[in-house]
Structures are given as structure tokens and as C-alpha cells.
Amino acid sequence: MQPRSYHIITFGCQMNVHDSGWLGAALETRGFATAPLEDAQVVIINTCSVREKPEQKVMSALGRVRQATGDDARVLVAVTGCVAQQLGSALFERSPQVRLVAGSDGIAQAPQAIERLLREPETRLALCAFTPGFPEREPAPGRLGAPSALVTIMQGCDNFCAYCIVPFTRGRQKSRAAGAILEECRLCIARGAREITLLGQNVNAYGQDKTGDGTSFFRLLERVAALPGLERLRYVTPHPKDMGADDVAAFATLPALCPRLHLPLQSGSDAVLARMRRRYDSAAFLRLVRDLRAARPDLALSTDLIVGFPGETEADFQATLEMMEACGFMSSFSFCYSDRPGAAATRFPDKVAPHVQHERLERLQALQDRLGQRWLDARVGQSTTLLLEAKSRRQGEPGGAEGPDAREDWQGRDPYGVPVHVSLPAHADHAGSLIPVRIIESRRHSLVAQALPPQG
Ligand code: SAH
Ligand code: SF4
Ligand code: F3S
């Protein structure tokens, strides 16, 4: 065990990925360094409860920690995030190493709590109360020079979709003050970010809650897009019912806003959408897609889909497949419905048998593979720009490893967020550069490009 070292295991969505990044940075500010699991003094398990078997995942992670650390009682385990919020201090009973449980709003206090627990080996702390306002955190700058940054604009959700646990684990919607968001965006840009993704569970409803400061989502987008030095702006997750006309128009008027939108459909059947309490139907979704593409003809859409929601018939499922075709999603996340404690659908009749769910999921994913490949194939020959991230793990061109003409493979992202590989002069740090390229090949989930000479 190395003193003042930490290791983070992350499950779940981008908000969790971001929270883990912040926790790590806040610990590093306090002099901690990352370590492999078996050497770490502090182990953080940042958890998700959105789908199947979240508790088992946490239990098996706790088991792995006990094994890797040889049950060392000096190791401090913190369970944070959505399962922590759900189970609270009951998690102390699962492993003697667990001495901190921090829910959604409690994470903001976790770094101080960890310091205290290291000083007080007999103490255990549960930080599971929801705060009345957005829990502002100490600034913990991410990795210097990281080309893209995530910035949280809100916490929680008020929608209570019938299947979803998020309003229970993340609490009611709380908007962060626009000034604090802009300040963090400026800090990210000053540290080298060229791309910012704004994060929230229902971003278009930003500002429409008690803690909002009167700024609408569209106004916030405009203000972030105007920050000097920002090249690309994205956001997740929007809700179709809350996408206003100005949010749609932003795709035409804000050049920094990338032509890619993750727009969760969940189901193509109006009956299922109504039971899910999504508050839009397939016609409204198609109208929204049409308006978005009118604003930004090259807009690429991706989505989330649930199969086997209670009462879903084969005809309902077919309607989902038809909507996928009609919208031409470039990619999707798709899941079998599962009961979540507290969510309304848990009490709905006509649960769909697991083998039917799995069989539908397979058909849906086969269709998505075709739609995704069609979209990628159509990109071949197009010119675009890449924001370069890092060297590809793939080896460089054979024989090109040395000499002035040596080349290396780099990975970047195009404005649609697709990973693109490109061969570039070796021995230079290209991370964070934006370069013009032409797409020359499509692969299964990525593209290959050739660098073009920089324009004037
Ligand atoms: N706030 C986001 C993300 C919610 S969770 C949104 O509204 O889209 C991410 C995805 O998990 C959801 O979009 C949904 O497709 C899926 N999901 C949520 N609860 C689920 C459940 N009980 N069973 C299966 N999938 C679920
Ligand atoms: Fe869950 Fe619906 Fe809120 Fe998304 S909008 S977090 S699916 S309740
Ligand atoms: Fe999971 Fe919580 Fe995110 S339940 S999806 S980690 S909001």
C-alpha cells in the first residue's frame, strides 16, 4: 500500500466519468497520486444504478478490492454516485473497508471527507443528503492540454420517465449558475480545451427550476459558444419534449455547435411512449428531426432505445425499427428494459419475457449496425476537420518509424464525434490541433483519413 495514492473504478454515464475525473483532480491537488488497485490507499467506486444488477456490480467490485488489497484494513474504500445515494449507510455492512458513502450531492464534499477519514481510522461517513441548490465544487482543473472538456450545467431530473431511477438517485433538477458554468468553461479553454461538452440529465430544461438564475439553455449555449478559443461545443442529454425552436435554430446560428445530437427516442410506438411518460409521440419526434435537419442539413443523430418495456408487442417493436430507419440514426445505445426500485413501470403489468427482450434487442442492434455502417460508408470522400486527441494504439506505417519522413498514426474526432485515424509526421505532439482531412476509408466503428494541406 502506497500512502497518499488513489484508484478510481467508474461505472455509468458521462456525468459519472466527469465526477470521477473531478474527484481524481481534487485528490491530486491534495498531493495524492494514482496507483494500481493493489497499491492504492484510497479506492473510490463510482457507481451507476440505471440498469440491470447495479448492486451486484458494486458487490463484485468490493470483492475485487478486498482481494487485490489483501483485506488491508488501512485501505479506505469510498462508494460514490447513484448506488451510494440509493443504499446509503447500508453499504458499510457490505465490507469493513467501506468508510465513506457519498451520494450525488455529497461527492462535492468527498475530498475533504477522505482527508478526515485518513486521520480518523475509526470514523465512517455517509454523505447522502440532497442539497437545496446546485452543489458547487472546488475548482479542480483537468489534465493540462486535454483537447476536450466536460462541464456540468445541472444536477438531477424532474421528468420521472416511468422506467427511470435517475430522479431518485440524482434528485430533483437543480441548475448551476450561468456565471459558474462560464467561469469553468473559460478555465478549461485556458488549460488547452478546444471542445466543451455541456452535461446534464435534461439539458434543454436548464434554468427552468427554482435554482435557475433566469438564463435559458439557448442563452447559455450562445454565451458558451462565444467564448474566445472554443472551437467545438456539444451537449448531452437533451429531451425531445424540451427542445425549443431556439434550441433547434442554434444548429443554424452557432457555428461552434457540432452537427451531432444524441436525442433519446426510447421507443417508436406511441402507446409505449405514452406509458413511458415521455410526453412526445412519434410524429412530434419526426417533426423535430425534420426541423433539426432543416437547420443543419448534415446533422447526425444518435439515440437511446429500450426494448421490451412492459406491454411492448411485436407491432410496437416494429414501430421502433421503422423509426430508426426514418431517422437514420448513426448510432444508438440500446437496452433491455429492467425494473428499477421506485420507478413507476416496476408496477406495470405485462412484463416482457427476457428471451423475447433479448431476441428483439438482437434484431434492433443488427439494424443499427446496418444504419451505422451506411452512415460511415457515406462519409468516404468527404473533407472534414479533426480535433486530434492522442497517438493511435495501432502501430505506425511499416518502415516509417525513423528518419525525417517518419510517420505515426493519430486518433482524432470529426465534428460528428466519430473516431478517425490519420497518419501524421512523427515526433510531434499533435494533441489539441485541428487539422483538415479527407476521409479515405470506413471501418466498423471508425474512419480513416488523409491529412490535407492546411487552408490559407
Ligand atoms: N437523462 C438521460 C439519460 C438517462 S439514463 C436521458 O433522459 O436520456 C440513460 C439511458 O438508460 C436512458 O436513455 C434509457 O434508454 C436507459 N434506461 C434508463 N432506465 C432504464 C431501465 N429501467 N431499463 C432499461 N434501460 C433504461
Ligand atoms: Fe431518466 Fe427520463 Fe430524466 Fe432521462 S429524462 S434522466 S430517462 S427520468
Ligand atoms: Fe447511472 Fe446515475 Fe448516470 S444511475 S446513468 S450514473 S445518472
Image (cartoon, grey):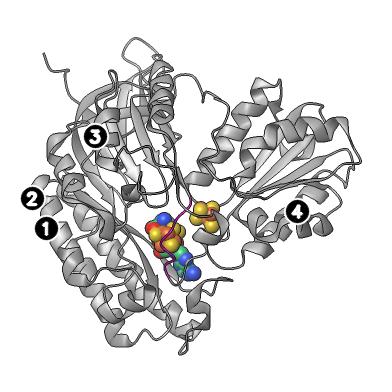
Mark positioned earlier in the residue sequence (4 or 1): 4
Which of discs 4 and 1 lies nearer the camera? The answer is 1
Label of residue 294 in the image? 2
Height in image: 346 above or below 438? below
Q: Looking at the image, which residue is at 31% across and 80% down?
A: 317
Q: Nearer the viewer, residue 36 or 287?
A: 287
Mark positioned earlier in the residue sequence (1 or 3): 1
Q: Is residue 388 left or right of residue 61?
A: left
**Disc 2 and disc 1 in contact, CB within 8 angstroms:** yes
Mark positioned earlier in the residue sequence (3 or 4): 4
Measure the C-alpha gap from mark 3 to mark 4. 43 Å
Mark positioned earlier in the residue sequence (2 or 3): 2
Measure the C-alpha gap from mark 4 to mark 2. 50 Å
Label of residue 360 in the image? none
Measure the C-alpha gap from mark 4 to mark 1. 47 Å
Report x, y in % for residue 352: 45, 85
Q: Looking at the image, which residue is at 64% across and 21% down?
A: 29
**Amino acid type for the residue under numbered disc 3:** Ala
Q: Which residues are magenta?
A: 156-161
Which of discs 4 and 2 lies nearer the camera? The answer is 2
**Residue linked to disc 4:** 62
Report x, y in % for residue 417: 30, 41
Q: Looking at the image, which residue is at 27% across and 86% down?
A: 315
**Residue linked to disc 1:** 290
Q: Looking at the image, which residue is at 45% across and 55% down?
A: 157
